Amino acid sequence: KNEVEQSPQNLTAQEGEFITINCSYSVGISALHWLQQHPGGGIVSLFMLSSGKKKHGRLIATINIQEKHSSLHITASHPRDSAVYICAAYGNQFYFGTGTSLTVIP
Amino acid sequence: DAGVIQSPRHEVTEMGQEVTLRCKPISGHDYLFWYRQTMMRGLELLIYFNNNVPIDDSGMPEDRFSAKMPNASFSTLKIQPSEPRDSAVYFCASRPAYSTNTGELFFGEGSRLTVL
């Protein structure tokens, strides 16, 4: 059983669509990270959340501690958003989701 | 700042050889993390340091793996002896002690290790 579950595993969207990626976790955590990994392999940390909501440009991340659930939203999606998005929950150790592969078609 | 710097970017070695991966974190960052990524297991945390002290090494697979951080600007991850199942991309990341609004972890470009 994975402590962190992401959905969907794969997602294809048309440019401009609103996108939601979900992350559920089963362990107690102090923070949750959203990571972005581009096809070239480099990893960028998008957000670290411990409560509420954070916004950066077209990206919004929310977390509901009671429900043990986080979402990453992308508004007005663009082909350059195509990447794998990884959820990582930190309690007494890091637990990683398996990633959501997003493809945005022009 | 140049970001987190890892070396080598690519390493191909034979089973049984010693492998040393290096990482220079961003200046002023208090935390340093070593991760491993494979197709089968995804991203895994191996070990992390706070102010050069190892805090959690529960992700280190076995005694063949060791990590050191002799000072605030340098860390190594050593595999001795290496095995084919160690083939992976190894990432180093660092972050400051206090949170900022957005991305908290700064990743290096990774070291791709292939053990034949």
Image (cartoon, rainbow, N blue to C red):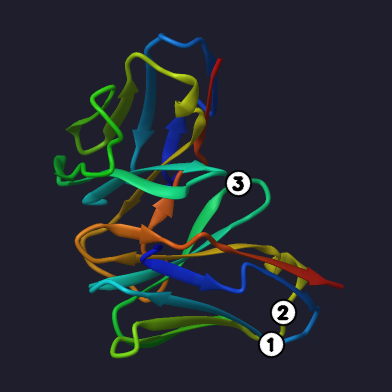
Marks 2,3: beta carbons within 8 A = no
The numbered dot on residue A92 is: none
> Can I make out residue B114 in this image?
yes
Q: CA distance from mark 2 to mark 3?
A: 21 Å
Which residue, as the protein is rendered here, is positioned at the far right?
A106
Q: Which residue is mark 1?
A: A18
Q: Which residue is mark 3?
A: A41
Tell me residue B7's x, y (percent): 46, 27
**Circle 2 sits in a helix, a strand or a loop, which is it?**
loop
The amino acid type found where label 3 is placed reads Gly
Q: Which residue is mark 2?
A: A77
Marks 1,3: beta carbons within 8 A = no
Marks 2,1: beta carbons within 8 A = yes
Circles 2 and 3 on the same subunit:
yes
On the rendered structure, is B56 left or right of A79? left
Comes first in the chain, label 1 or label 3: 1
**Circle 3 sits in a helix, a strand or a loop, which is it?**
loop
